[in-house]
Amino acid sequence: MESDGEQRGDRGGDRPRLFQRLRELPVVGRAADWGLGPAAVSKNTKRAGARIAGLEVTESVCPYCAVGCGQLVYTRDGELVDIEGNPRSPINQGTLCPKGQASRQLIQQPGRLTKVLYRRPHGTEWEELDLERAMDMIAERVIAARENHWQETHENGWRVDRTLGFAHLGGATLDNEENYFIKKLFTALGAVQIENQARI
Ligand code: SF4
């Protein structure tokens, strides 16, 4: 007797074949072409095609959320020119939501901060900090919070070895690899609350 998984797999595998065979029927194929073929390409899309002609293209993944849409990143001499949805991606099939379409601004938005800014306790102004100094300050605070709030045992006597002195909330522009290392690091430090905006 087949397992549930095998039964599900078989049904899932048959579906694309069925659609393909339907699509091969002349009437169905023509109807599908009227909706999706060259007749449906707008003037703007044609102009966009001319704009990106000759550019170097690299396949990438949108960093903004856990959907993981495929992107095509267009560059000229190493400079970013455009980002579009990747039609080869089974997830988004060439589309991008407004956030994904605007991801070029992660790099080229004129208001993007490129220096570390620090506002000290009770301060009213932002101060520029050297990156190395800022990283040292963060490390000092993490170590102090861990030591000051370390719990070996729960009030019920259970062994917990954890700290509730800090948590981590990642941002949407962190990629998979960064999130992997953040989870490893904060778990090793004893943090319990480790989340990412993309999952909320
Ligand atoms: S933010 Fe939008 S484009 Fe980016 S992965 Fe999520 S749904 Fe896709």
Image (cartoon, rainbow, N blue to C red):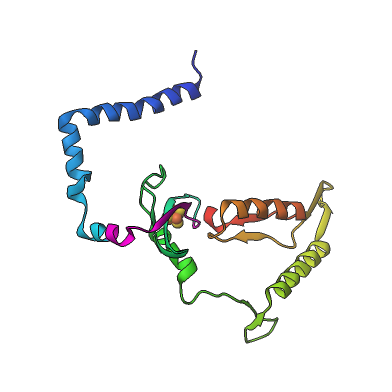
Residue furthest to the top in view is 1
Q: Nearer the viewer, residue 47 or 56?
A: 56
Where's residue 53, x and y in %? 32, 58
Identify the magenta region. Answer: 48-64
Q: Give the quadrant of ligand 1.
A: bottom left
Q: Is residue 144 magenta?
A: no
Q: Is residue 105 left or right of residue 192?
A: left
Where's residue 71, x and y in %? 43, 53
Quadrant housing residue 100: bottom left
Which residue shows up at 72% across the image and 72% down it?
132
Which residue shows up at 39% across the image and 50% down it?
86
In the displayed structure, 166 sits above or below 114; it is: above
Which residue shows up at 80% across the image and 67% down it?
144
Where's residue 13, x and y in %? 40, 26
Q: Is residue 53 magenta?
A: yes
Which residue shows up at 50% across the image and 56% down it?
63
Quadrant housing residue 23: top left
Q: Nearer the viewer, residue 101 or 164?
A: 101
In the displayed structure, 162 sits above or below 7; it is: below
